[in-house]
Image (cartoon, helix red, strand yellow):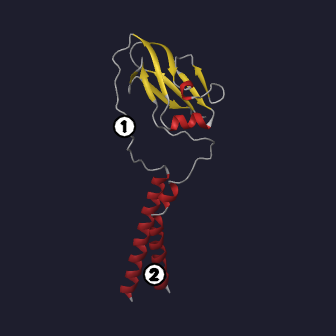
Amino acid sequence: MKKLLSVVLAAIMTVSVFALSVVPAMAATVNSPSGVPIIDNRPGLEVNGAPTSTDINYAADENNANEITFTYVGEGTLTGWEDNLESLGLAEGTDYTVTYNNDGSMTIAFLSQDAVDAWNNGQIVVNAIVDNAGPATTEPSNKNDSSKAPATGMTALAAGGVAVACAGMAVLAATKKKDAE
């Protein structure tokens, strides 16, 4: 009876190891329940009309992913901000809102699907108007080729490790029982 139980347990663990390969694929298709998702397709960042990769930081608001705050961190004195939202056919108040913050940063809230699509397609350009700016660092537009696993990947990996270890122990127990008999 114990031998039969060990073999059945080994078979179940083996099936669970094979099922593990499906878990990451299923996790990758999970969508956020929030409304219109924003994808980080890096907007065009400029200082006085010249592309930059180091002089402007941007981040989504923790409470609303559709609000992006831009902060000038380069040399020189920030005098204002420009964007190309109206030239893309978007209307302020309907498609987006712009807020100029006390710390000199600018927040754009994307309200409509058209505005989110413009962001997701990389069409948004934000330009910092700066007095006495140092030379802007130019950056070629490269596609982000990073291959980071979704947040559930580590959990699936840990579960897989446990399943493999248990399957190994079950097979070892079954073979030891066989040798003992």
- Residue in the image at 58% along x and 28% along y: 89
Residue 35 placement (x, y as % from top left):
63, 42
- 20 shown above or below 104: below
Front-lying residue, 78 or 169: 78
Determine whether label 1 and label 2 are within 8 Å by CB.
no
**Tag 2: residue type?**
Val
Query: Mark 1 against mark 2, which lies toward the viewer?
Result: 1
On the picture, is 94 further left or further right than 27? right
Q: Can residue 25 be seen in this view?
A: yes
Q: Which mark is residue 75?
A: none
- Residue in the image at 46% along x and 72% along y: 13
* Residue located farthest toward the right when viewing the structure as drawn: 94
| Few, some or many residues within 10 Å of mark 1 (<14, 14–19, 20+) | few
* Residue located farthest toward the bottom when viewing the structure as drawn: 181
Q: How far apart are marks 1 and 2 (CA)?
A: 53 Å
Quadrant occupied by the C terminus: bottom left
Q: Can residue 65 be seen in this view?
A: no
Q: Residue 142 carries which label?
A: 1
User: For residue 101, which quarter of the picture?
Assistant: top right
| Few, some or many residues within 10 Å of mark 2 (<14, 14–19, 20+) | some
Tell me the element at label 1.
Answer: loop
- Residue in the image at 44% along x and 29% along y: 44
Front-lying residue, 11 or 40: 40
User: For residue 75, which quarter of the picture?
Assistant: top left
* Residue located farthest toward the top when viewing the structure as drawn: 132
- Residue in the image at 41% along x and 67% along y: 165
**Tag 1: residue type?**
Asn
Q: Circle 2 is placed at which residue position? A: 7
Tell me the element at label 2.
Answer: helix
Q: Earlier in the sequence, mark 1 or mark 2?
A: 2
- 174 shown above or below 135: below
